Amino acid sequence: FFLQHYHGLSAVGVFSVALKISMIIGLFGISFRQAWVPYAFSMMNEPHAKRKYELGFIFFTGAIFILAFAVVIFGKHIILLISSSKYLGAGFVIGYACLGVIFINLCGNFFSLGIHIKKNTIYSLVAYLFGLLANIIAAIILVPKYSIVGAGISLALGSFVTALSLLYFSNRSY
């Protein structure tokens, strides 16, 4: 909405290419989640469950950051592979979009586990509302001046606030 209002549909198109490329990270996160979440719930009452959660977190975080680094490094090539050279501006925002996707995947795979284990899911709603609010405020401030880079930063910031909120509520619950 803010991109279209301040910079037009061409900026929205460039930003959407960056988001589509960052979904490479999202596909990895969703694939991991399909195996991890059932496993995490199956061991929640085991004595060493928290240590296994830590090891899963370390593995996942390392793997997703390596993948994100590769996506950022080869971003311009990926842009040319899926679109045309007029969308090369998306290369400036791929890193921010990947960071936002990483935080959201950390939320779904790890930071919300305690909330779901203890069935305090109202905290998920609160955490996502905090992230939404942070994203909107950042977009209001950053998009008019910085265009797609401002939108990317606001996306990453909103996802980061969601992740921190979920981590706080999850640790408080479990």
Image: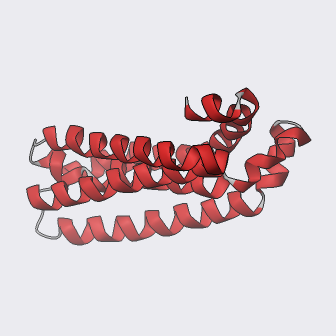
Please say whether residue 151 is visible from this viewpoint.
Answer: no
Classify residue 53 by image quadrant.
bottom left
Position of the N terminus, as image quadrant, is top right
Q: Is residue 62 above or below residue 72?
A: below
Q: Residue at x 55, y 50 (%)?
A: 142
Is 14 on the left-hand or right-hand side of 154?
right
Q: Residue at x 37, y 48 (%)?
A: 134
**Residue drawn at the location 90% of the way across and 42% of the way down:** 85
Position of 124 with respect to 27 (left or right) is: left
Q: From this viewpoint, is residue 87 visible?
A: yes
**159 or 101, nearer to the observer:** 159
Q: Position of residue 99 (x, y in %)?
A: 53, 57
Who is closer to the viewer here, 1 or 44? 1
Front-lying residue, 172 or 2? 2
Give the total number of marks visible in the rendering.
0
Q: 174 above or below 158?
A: below
**In the rendering, at what x and y percent does residue 97 appear?**
58, 50
The coloring applied to the image is: secondary structure
Q: Position of residue 174 (x, y in %)?
A: 11, 58
The percent position of residue 163, horizontal first and vertical second, equals: 33, 55
Identity of the residue drawn at 46% across and 65% down: 61
Spot the residue most to the right. Answer: 85
